[in-house]
Image (cartoon, grey):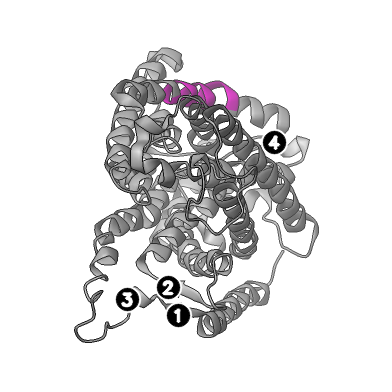
Amino acid sequence: MHTPGSKVSGYIVLMIVQIIFLVLFWVFVRYEKAVLPAPIAAEDAGSAKEHVSKYPQFQDIQVMIFIGFGFLMTFLRKYGYSATGYTLFMAALVVQWAVLMKGFLHMEGGKISLSLESIIDADIAAAVPLISMGALLGRTTPIQLLCMSIFEVALFAGNEYLALNILSICDCGGSITVHAFGAYFGLAVALMLRPASDQNDAGKHEGANYVSDLFAMIGTTFLWVYWPSFNSVLAEGSGGERAILNTFLSLAAATVTTFVVSALVSHENKLDMVHVQNSTLAGGVAVGTVCNLLLGAHGAVLIGIIAGTVSVLGYRYLTPWLTSNLRIHDTCGVHNLHGMPALISAIASAIVASMVTADDYQSELQDIFPAMVHGNNGTVTKIMGGLGRNASTQAGYQLFGIAVTLLIAIGGGILAGGVMKYTSFRNLEKDEQHQDEQYWEVPAVENKEEYELKITDELLL
């Protein structure tokens, strides 16, 4: 058991972390020149408009992170407070930490430049520990989530820098660096925190009811509507519009496919709400890495069909197998929504990259595939293998990028899970999991109703 004092100490640690962030922001972070007041009659006096123009997409991503992810995880019938509350807490924490960690890798003059784009980058980074939290939903304490997030975001920032700047892979929508990393890091932590063989059955609160599933569909709908903004916000030039078009078509195809395959493989050929809540979004993940490339409408639709099929089959067959054989309780099924679709996206990126030509991409080649440009491409980072890659070499680096990402994510997750399990962190007992009462004040009438139901059941028995 744990004492009230042990609960309070966790929140004291959280406040200390926030104060440390304050000091780091004070010492290292400065506004970017473009967002400072311009001198009178300066030629670049209107340059700040470029930053403001991305605010609508910034709002879309905010909705995805704080509402979409939060409500998608409310399907557990007694974990709604925690799903939405911890999403808000973790995202607010991670956005600050991501600004610092990613900024440390791109410092100029010993300072971190703060702009709207850096906040957008940090918002996208917040998706990483939220994806990982989905694999652990209901089975960790707030202080465990705090420490996992701090470590994971630092590792994510390093891996992203390696993948995008040194390996110079294309990953516009973050399927490799965000979705694959978050999913397999979370699964590795879940592997380390897996229950004993005699406690591998589902917990008494590990399930949904009609109302909680309906709330989760709110999250699905918000994510579906705003996913094109998530994939396109960092795209350059006309690639941004291609990213929107390709993402929408892939989502639409995945959604139709999900309904069909769900009805085919589910019990009594009825639709499964788990599939509808999650697999309909798989197209957005699967097209992420290639969303700004010249896929053609048919390519985007094909990716969506494959992603929807793989995701539904994963929920129907793979998730139960992982639970029964490896004792990995992937609560939200992040392997099916984020993990496998991200692998599909990485493979698709290698296929498309192998067919890239300078004639096709014209002036955008430098922005999308900087390592394929001959001579000076304007980057200051030394790219592995040098410049002037051909298409087949770039395709190989795309596969190398996902392999490195998986290695770092799984290794980091095993390390984080080991620390969470074998050190002084308190682990929830089985009967404490998947319920809000451990850390939230819940309405008294709810407890009364539960008590009355319990008494009624006992009388009937």
| Image disc number at residue 30 | 1
- Which of discs 1 and 4 lies nearer the camera? The answer is 1
Which circle's residue, 1 or 4, is located before the other in the chain? 1
165 shown above or below 107: above
Q: Residue at x 50, y 24 (%)?
A: 351
* Residue 107: quadrant of the picture: bottom right
For badge 4, the amino acid type reads Asn
Residue that mark 3 sits on: 35
Q: Main secondary structure of the magenta part?
A: helix
For badge 2, the amino acid type reads Leu
Left or right: where 344 falls relative to 409: left
Give yes or no for contact between labels 3 and 2 (Cβ–Cβ under 8 Å). yes
* Residue 331: quadrant of the picture: top right
For badge 3, the amino acid type reads Val
Residue that mark 2 sits on: 114
Q: How many marks?
A: 4
What segment is highlighted magenta in the picture? 307-318
The answer for how far apart the CA atoms under marks 4 and 2 are is 47 Å
The answer for how far apart the CA atoms under marks 1 and 4 are is 50 Å
State the image coordinates of residue 456 (x, y, percent, origin top left).
47, 43
